[in-house]
Image (cartoon, helix red, strand yellow):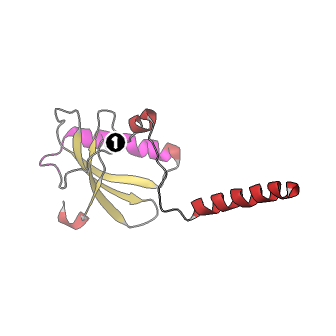
C-alpha cells in the first residue's frame, strides 16, 4: 500500500485537472488601469459634400502633396483640391480628386485637413460625377 500513494496522488491530480477542463465557470479577468488609459480614439467621419467656395489653400496644399508623393515614390497624384476657408478648429474642409499615375482611374473624396495639412478626420469617398 505504501507504493500506491504516489500513483493515487497522480490519479487524483489528473482527475482534478480534468474536472476543470470542461468547467462552465469563467475565470475572472481584471483590466489594468494602464490598459484602460490606452484606449484609442478614432476621429469622426468627414461631412460629405464639397465646400461652397474654394480658397487658395487647396492649390497650395495640392502642390506640396504632389511634390512629397514624388519624393516618396507614391503613385497617388492629386488632380484638384477645393478647400474651404479655415474653421475655428483650424481645419480646412476639402474635396480632392486624385488618380494613380499611369491610369485613367479617378477617385474623389472629402476630408478635413488639419493645420499641418494632414487628415484630421476619416475621409469620405465621393462620386466624382456629382461634383464639378
| Picture layout, residue 93 above or below residue 6 | above
User: Looking at the figure, which quarter contains the N terminus?
Assistant: bottom right
| Picture layout, residue 110 above or below residue 102 | above
Q: Which residues fall within the magenta stretch?
A: 51-70
Q: Counting other residues with Cα less than 10 Å from the Cα at mark 1, is it few (<14), some (14-19), or many (20 or more)?
A: few
Q: Residue at x 44, y 41 (%)?
A: 31
What is the residue that sits farthest to the right in this orientation? 3
**Which quadrant of the structure image shows residue 15?**
bottom right
Q: Residue at x 18, y 65 (%)?
A: 130
For the residue pair 128 and 89, the one nearer the viewer reads as: 89
Q: Is residue 65 magenta?
A: yes
Is 67 left, or right, of 61 in this rendering? Answer: right
Number of on-image labels: 1
Is 87 left, or right, of 11 in this rendering? Answer: left
What is the residue that sits farthest to the front in this orientation? 1
- Secondary structure character of the magenta stretch overall: helix
| Picture layout, residue 98 above or below residue 104 | above
**Which quadrant of the structure image shows residue 10?**
bottom right
Residue 14 appears at what percent x and percent y?
Answer: 70, 60
User: Looking at the figure, which quarter contains the C terminus?
Assistant: bottom left
For the residue pair 39 and 108, the one nearer the viewer reads as: 39
Q: Is residue 53 magenta?
A: yes
For mark 1, what is the residue? 41
Residue 62 appears at what percent x and percent y?
Answer: 33, 44
For the residue pair 3 and 90, the one nearer the viewer reads as: 3
Residue 98 appears at what percent x and percent y?
Answer: 35, 57
For the residue pair 50 and 125, the one nearer the viewer reads as: 125
Q: Residue at x 40, y 53 (%)?
A: 77
Residue 2 appears at what percent x and percent y?
Answer: 86, 54
Q: Secondary structure at mark 1?
A: loop
Amino acid at each position: 500500500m505504501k507504493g500506491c500513494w504516489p500513483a493515487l496522488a497522480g490519479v487524483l491530480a489528473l482527475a482534478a485537472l480534468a474536472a476543470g477542463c470542461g468547467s462552465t465557470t469563467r475565470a475572472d479577468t481584471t483590466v489594468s488601469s494602464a490598459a484602460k488609459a490606452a484606449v484609442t480614439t478614432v476621429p469622426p467621419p468627414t461631412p460629405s459634400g464639397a465646400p461652397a467656395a474654394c480658397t487658395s489653400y487647396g492649390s497650395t496644399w495640392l502642390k506640396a502633396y504632389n511634390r512629397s508623393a514624388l519624393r516618396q515614390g507614391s503613385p497617388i497624384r492629386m488632380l484638384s483640391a477645393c478647400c474651404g476657408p479655415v474653421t475655428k478648429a483650424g481645419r480646412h474642409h476639402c474635396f480632392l480628386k486624385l488618380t494613380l499615375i499611369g491610369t485613367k482611374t479617378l477617385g474623389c473624396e472629402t476630408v478635413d485637413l488639419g493645420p499641418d495639412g494632414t487628415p484630421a478626420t476619416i475621409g469620405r469617398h465621393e462620386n466624382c460625377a456629382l461634383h464639378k
